[in-house]
Image (cartoon, helix red, strand yellow):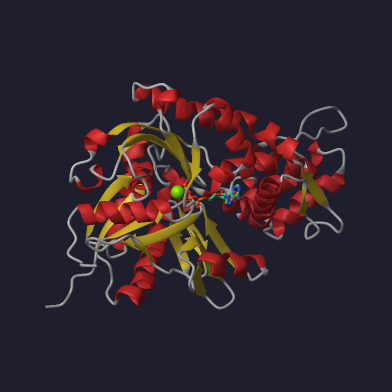
Amino acid sequence: MKTPTPAIGIDFGTSNSAMAFALEGGLAQSLPLEGTATTMPTALFYNAEDRSTHFGREAVALYLSGVEGRLMRSLKSLLGSSLMQETTAVYDGLVSFQDIVARFLHELATRAEQTLGQRPERVVLGRPVHFVDDDAKRDRQAEDSLRQAARSAGYRDISFQLEPIAAAFDYEQRVTKESVILIVDIGGGTSDFTVVRLGPERMTRADRASDVLATSGVHIGGTDFDQRLNLECVMPLLGFRHHDARGREVPSKVFFELSSWHLINWLYAPKAVRQAQELRSSYADMRLHDRLMTVLEERYGHRIANEVEQAKIESSVNDAPSTIDLSFVETGLCASLTPADMAQQLAELLAKTVASAHECVRRAGLRSNDLDAIYLTGGSSALRPFQQALRRGFAGVQITEGDLFGGVAAGLAYSARAAGVHGRA
Ligand SMILES: Nc1ncnc2c1ncn2[C@@H]1O[C@H](COP(=O)(O)OP(=O)(O)OP(=O)(O)O)[C@@H](O)[C@H]1O
Ligand SMILES: [Mg+2]
């Protein structure tokens, strides 16, 4: 009898995606998605030069190398918004964002098939605690959209698990005694929290609902940090907060959009470019407007966002100033980012994130010193000012850093197995 393909977990992330499966009695195994890498940027590139479609690192690299085409990133941020059904022009016509998400999930299945030998059909998809904050209807629409995209991509048996609960299941493999843990997952688009009771004895129970003491989440993540830093450090060089000779400020909408990963593409439409051209009369220093027009006409928006993101990571890792190279916009142009600037510019967003963590503990009916530990996952949990803010907010609680990029997919694989998988380790 043919061995059934194991049910798999898919972490469809705002920035990165990952897939894993777990056979009976074994640890979760992540699937290679791009060469040997087990995560891949949630990015597509529609190459207009040779009419081909690319994914992941390859998509980002082609875009950055200047190949003509459209880069799609941060697709998850569009789930639940009216933009999902809007179409955008790529080389072979108009596609909706719904189709683009489906195309990405289809590609994940194709890549999984290379390892599994068969296309995966049964899947547990991760979802944040809130796709959309404070709007239950749109939040449901977001999940429905993702389910529909998975269906169009060929998956048959589709269920969802909260991302921080999945991260908890992964962490549980390493827990040696029963503990109450605050799981903190700070990703590209959302910050998700859960307070869970974990332990070796509990791991084998089929129904874990009573071990999940509380969840909370906010729609704030690394792409919001990038946006804020971009607005503060780069956009002023293009005219943000600039005044004309009569003291009137340049309308700021274009700068908010240009610094938001998921809105950048809209600014390249002829109408948006014309509107930006018309802003010229609002400038006193025309050099700044020239830069704005260069960025729109040469489609440098994602490239700038990428530079800002790299500077953020570099400055955080090294705890030292980093440079945002903008010489592709104008010879010699650059901006700098110091750790102190970053901490200050992100303070408000970080405070909201830590407040959501406190809210989670409160909902669980606990106080922070009732926690045995805090477990960190998600790429943005490595951000130094975030960790500092969290330490201040949870003084005395032990903080453990986990598998930042693969933990959620692994936990989703355990969820998939618990839901009934036939594989054997
Ligand atoms: N060392 C680092 N310091 C700070 N931020 C980092 C670091 N490494 C990666 N990041 C940020 O982590 C984010 C990506 O994290 P991750 O892959 O966990 O997100 P995601 O799962 O795609 O998003 P989400 O879970 O919100 O949908 C990006 O915003 C990236 O800039
Ligand atoms: Mg994530």
Image coordinates of residue 367 in percent, x first then y, are 41, 21
Q: Nearer the viewer, residue 337 or 14?
A: 337
Taking depth in this image into account, of 311 and 153 the one nearest to the observer is 311
Quadrant position of residue 209: top left
Is 188 situated above or below 138?
below
Residue 358 lies, with reference to residue 205, above or below; the image says above
Q: Position of residue 371 (x, y in %)?
A: 41, 29
Q: In the displayed structure, would residue 54 be above or below residue 280?
A: below
Looking at the image, which residue is at 26% across and 35% down?
A: 211
Q: Horizontal and vertical percent for residue 175?
A: 36, 45
Relative to residue 305, is residue 355 drawn left or right?
A: left
Which quarter of the figure has residue 284? Answer: top right
* Residue 148 visible, this orientation: no
The image quadrant where one finds the N terminus is bottom left
Report x, y in % for residue 207.
18, 42
Front position in the image: 339 or 59 = 339
x 39%, y 37%: residue: 130
Q: Where is residue 294, by image quadrant?
A: bottom right
Is 395 placed left or right of 20 in the picture? right
- The residue positioned 67% from the left and 69% from the top of the image is 65
